[in-house]
Image (cartoon, rainbow, N blue to C red):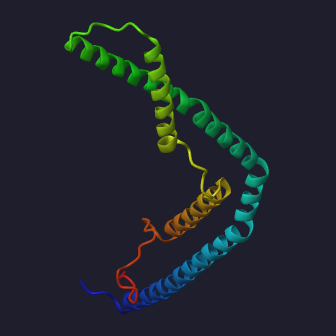
Amino acid sequence: MSLSRKRKKQLRKLQKQANTLWESQQVLMGEAAKVARDAGHQLGNYNREHVKPAVQNTYEQYAAPYVDKSVRATRKVYNGALIPAAGAVVGGALSVWDAANDTRGRLAHGRGVDLDLSSVKKNAAKYGKKATKKFQSRAALPEPKKKRGAGGVIALILGVTAAAGVLYAAWQTLRADDELWVADDPLRAPDA
């Protein structure tokens, strides 16, 4: 089946128009990618120059005093009440253990049971002080090192979110749809 000269001419003209359109789309996609890159850089600059300082200032003005106050209160309760109480409990348990060992030793040597509770109380106080000191040296909350504040974290999250938005927009622009087909060979348009 052969085509008439008129149809061949029309097909060549259509192929030429398709090639021209294809080249202009490639140029447009290149420009869109460049604009997306520049927008990402500008967004990073805006975040660094405006958003991060504003968030940091707001955090330091409103939230930091309450966070510092709660950290001090927690440290005070932990170091001032919890550790001494745990030391007293451990000290009491150690003194009971010591009294049980002493009684077992007395019974083993045939000396009988000693019902003097003053030595048990004295040992409980001694072991309690030792255990409290040991707990405080090992488990006390140290003074916190200066870390990235909540403002820095919030600014980091905003920056990552903005970058993800730019990447998503670029992906939506450049992804393959049913209506838009991108060939593997960028120099040649698909055959019609």
Q: Residue at image x 36%, y 93%? A: 5
Vertical comparison of 192 with 153: above or below: below
Vertical comparison of 23 with 83: above or below: below
Q: Residue furthest right?
A: 61
Residue 10 drawn at (x, y percent):
43, 87
Residue 82 drawn at (x, y percent):
55, 30
Q: Quadrant location of residue 175?
A: bottom left
Q: Residue at image x 35%, y 80%? A: 184
Q: Give whichever of 38, 150 is nearer the camera.
A: 150
Q: Residue at image x 25%, y 17%? A: 105
Q: Give whichever of 76, 184 is nearer the camera.
A: 76
Residue 101 drawn at (x, y percent):
29, 19
- Residue 11 left/right relative to 77: left
Q: Give whichever of 189, 60 is nearer the camera.
A: 60
Q: Residue at image x 35%, y 17%? A: 99
- Residue 186 left/right relative to 3: right
